[in-house]
Image (spheres, rainbow, N blue to C red):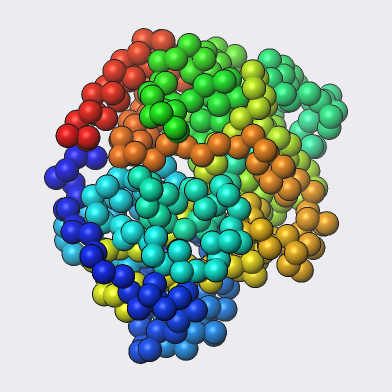
Amino acid sequence: MGDKMIAKVGKMSGVGLLALLGATTLVSADVTVEFWHSFGGGSGEALAQIIENFEAENDGITIDAQEIGNYNDIVTKLQAAIPAQRAPDAVIMEVTRYGLFADRGVLMDLTPYVDADPLKDDLFDFAREVGVYEDKNYIVPFNSSTPVLYFNKAIFERAGLSEDTPLNTYDDLLAAAQQITDTLGDEGITGIAAPGQFARWGLIMGNDSDLIDSVSGEILLDAPNTIEAYEFMASLVHEHEVASPDGVTQENNGRDAFLAGRVGMMINSTGNYGRAASSLGDDAVVVPMPCNKVCAVPIGGAGIGILSTSDSEVQDAAYQFISFAASAESNALWFSETGYMPINQQTAQQPLAIEALAEKPGIDVAINQLDFARGRPRPPVVTWMRASEYDLWQAMALGQRDPSEVLTEFAESTRAEAERLER
């Protein structure tokens, strides 16, 4: 994203009343907070319940929640809204893409709010860290996830695969996907959904590499293990034909085909747990991500930020809602209904979470992966890199271009863009 696409907004020099007096301070007058989010279906219903609970406890604050689209849509629409002075007051921002908006002063520095909020001591370490960019806190996590591997037990059984079929390496995935496709392909069933971008990131990490190093910022798009991972992922589509090209040109197609019972496996966010269980019932099985060379998974999801252009009283009200949404009670509701990971250390003791962990097999897989989960980079170039990667992945997956050539060029252009954005 270029400088012209976002109007620079001066950083707020002061902090709101809530930050000065503590997170439990009540807003004194009727306030409406316009909140952009990305949740529909069951997730949208869970969010609506959290908002209803908040408004019931906070007379005078109205959360005007608007479903804008997916994370990409939010970035695009926020870019357009800022210069038009139509930006919201609070917004869901994916964890690798908020850095661009923080860098431009679009998002408010929430550090004074967070420091004054007892909530900070209840958040898991990863949840406290995920909102920090250049030593300042710009988002508070709401929906956190890792990718997990889903499979359809009924399809496995029909293809002659047991429920405990090894799915630990690239070779394991390919073998299972080939058996499903060979056995059931005449019925229009394929072995695995083409991996979406979050899944691609996870498979690359499991091959002992990354796209951009989250600590050093080193661009690793052309690292040998990254290239090897893309070669494998692309081969699922154009060489082995165990994944449909439909899931390459439109990533949600692969997910939707899995949920409709036409695909044996998919790698996707733990946030799809509720949808998978609703669609497939007991046939939906969740297992950890493959560890091809190492066990490593990216932490995904999003947090809520506040726009620096909003009035201070609206900012106070917005943070009051953010803190409520991250509380153990709200987080337990969210976790139990969606499958997104708990972000609050007290969540597991809540009745809704206890019930979910006891009665929903596999909902704890992402939690168990936290031992080897890693945060991802969030400098401004990541937004550009992620937007650019889709078309390049399509060219590789459809067999139009060689992954090594594509990724070498992509790494060079990403380094150049990173330098440009830093000037």
* Quarter that holds the C terminus: top left
Question: In the picture shown, does residue 67 fall above or below 147?
Answer: below
Q: Is residue 57 left or right of residue 303?
A: right
Measuring 60% from the left and 53% from the top, which residue is drawn there?
124
In the rendered image, the residue lying farthest to the left is 4
- Residues 303 and 47: in front is 303
Number of numbered discs: 0
Of residues 48 and 161, the one drawn nearer to the viewer in this rendering:
48
Along the line of sight, which residue is nearer the eye, 180 or 25? 25
Residue 220 shown left or right of residue 266 in the figure: left
Residue 206 x, y percent position in the rendering: 60, 25
Q: Position of residue 4 (x, y in %)?
A: 14, 45
Report whether 46 appears left or right of 261.
left
Question: Horizontal and vertical percent for residue 371?
Answer: 67, 38
**In the rendered image, which quarter is residue 100 located in?**
top left
Q: Quadrant of the rendered structure where residue 244 is?
A: top right
Which part of the image, by quadrant, shows the N terminus? top left
Return the x and y of residue 345 as percentages of the image width and height: 66, 58
| Residue shown at 29% from the left, 75% from the top | 312
The residue depicted at 26 percent of the width and 75 percent of the height is 311
> Could one spot residue 383 in this view of the protein?
yes
Q: Residue at x 39, y 40 (%)?
A: 378
192, above or below 117, in the image: above
Dividing the picture into quadrants, the one containing residue 115 is: bottom left
- Residue 231 visible here: no
